Amino acid sequence: MIIYDRWMESNLQEALQTWRVVSIAGARQCGKTTLAKRLPTKTILPRSLDSETFLQAASEDPQSFVQHPVGTTLFIDEIQKEPRLLPAIKSAVDTSNRPGQFLLTGSSHLKAIPGVTESLAGRLHTIRLHTLTEGEFRGGKPDFPARAFSGEFPSRLTGGTKREIVESAFRGGYPEPARIREIYRPVWHRDYLEQLLTHDIADVAQIRKVGKLRDLFLFLAARSSKLWNTSEIATLLEISKVSVENYIAALEAMYLFDRVPSWTGGDYDRVVKRPKWFIGDTGTMCAVLKWKQAEVMLDGDRSGKLIESWVYHELSAAVGANAGYEIFHYRDREQREVDFLLENNAGELVGIEVKAGSVVRKDDFKSLLWFQRTLGGTRYRRSIVLYSGADTLSFGDGLLAVPLASLFC
């Protein structure tokens, strides 16, 4: 069994030395438990709520369940299955400020779990774990955000052709399907999704129309990286706008979709302030939409959505592993759009456009140049077009064409 080094491992170790309660959050099967088990076993006391015995004990006597020896970390796996443990944990940590008392993992946002009345505010630090990135598969480092601001990229990188990126996106980042034969991966993803939508979603919401939820998932998957509105979805699926909003909230709570907020720092009155949504794993996207690699390679719309969604996954994981960065998107009513904006703690900005092709022209920087001149101001550092070529090239005035491989090499 292959165990991959995770970009968040050092963050986890540091968090346990700082906060009383640490949570690893992410979709089921993304590697949360495996990451936790890489910690020194002598100080970790594991209790998984996937075990019926542990779950029953936690339900019957939460206060006793959370008791553990001083100097150890109680690791509670799948905490969302028994939210009544949270007040008991609060009581325990309020008697001692010792860091690393509890390590929790959860496959849904704690605040989205029905019955949760305790947020552990001021006591809890949450680490988001994505599915495996291409960088983690290859043993790379999450240094893209720092390079984006410094402008220091290798002059030439291999491994980032359009075909290789599409193959990576089709595989996705869940550890299990990465280990099995390619022909069976779509089956794994579809079985996985069916289990989530018919069983696990009960941890965060009561869904009466599972068929509509499946339809909604397909709608969102097909529009990953695109803007849409709930009224459009409600009309298409013939359900109420409130139901659409509740269903989307449930899918987001299970880390199946992520939202990227609109950048509004310029207070520009024509900005479209809707978030941009991305599927949590591109392998699932390809499987549920029943895409074929050969067809996607020849379809500009599908390959564009897929590669931009793949870029978001790599970029978001790298940002999570490095403190001090945020991701935004930009679009206005004149259809001017920037795929991603990276902002650091100093308020400095880097604009990023994603291009599936291997040729970059000055015109590919058009939206980035407009943003720089109109809204970016002195804090705008540079514009980057990520493309499927191998060379880092300057187009003058802080304009860089950078290989997609820079996200994992």
Image (cartoon, rainbow, N blue to C red):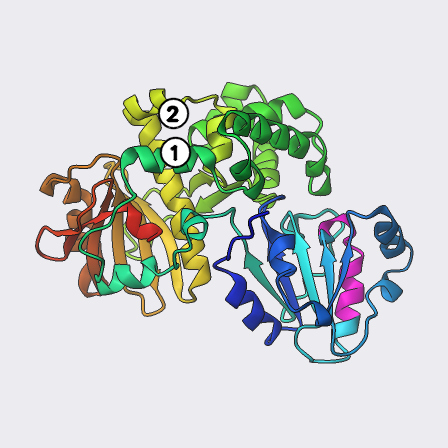
Q: Secondary structure beneath disc 2? A: helix
Instruction: Specify the amino acid type for callout 2.
Output: Gln
Return the x and y of residue 141 as percentages of the image width and height: 39, 59
Return the x and y of residue 41 as percentages of the image width and height: 70, 67
Q: Residues within 10 Å of mark 1 (few under 14, many from 20)?
A: some
Instruction: Specify the amino acid type for callout 1.
Output: Glu
Residue 366 included in the magenta stretch of the image: no
Q: Main secondary structure of the magenta part?
A: helix
Q: Residues within 10 Å of mark 2 (few under 14, many from 20)?
A: some
Question: Picture quarter containing residue 246?
Answer: top right
* Closer to the camera in the image, 264 or 212: 212
Residue 315's disc number: none
Above or below residue 400? Residue 23 is below
Q: Which residues are magenta?
A: 80-91
Answer left or right for 112 relative to 332: right
Which residue in the structure is indicated by mark 2? 293
Going 56% across and 60% down the picture, which residue do you hit? 127
Residue 263 visible here: no
Question: Rounded to the nearest whole Å, what is the CA distance between mark 2 and mark 1?
Answer: 7 Å
Residue 84 included in the magenta stretch of the image: yes
Considering every residue shown, the one lying at the far left of the view is 396
Which residue in the structure is indicated by mark 1? 167
Residue 344 visible here: yes
Answer left or right for 184 relative to 403: right
* Proximity of marks 2 and 1: CB atoms separated by less than 8 Å: yes
Return the x and y of residue 409 as percentages of the image width and height: 32, 53
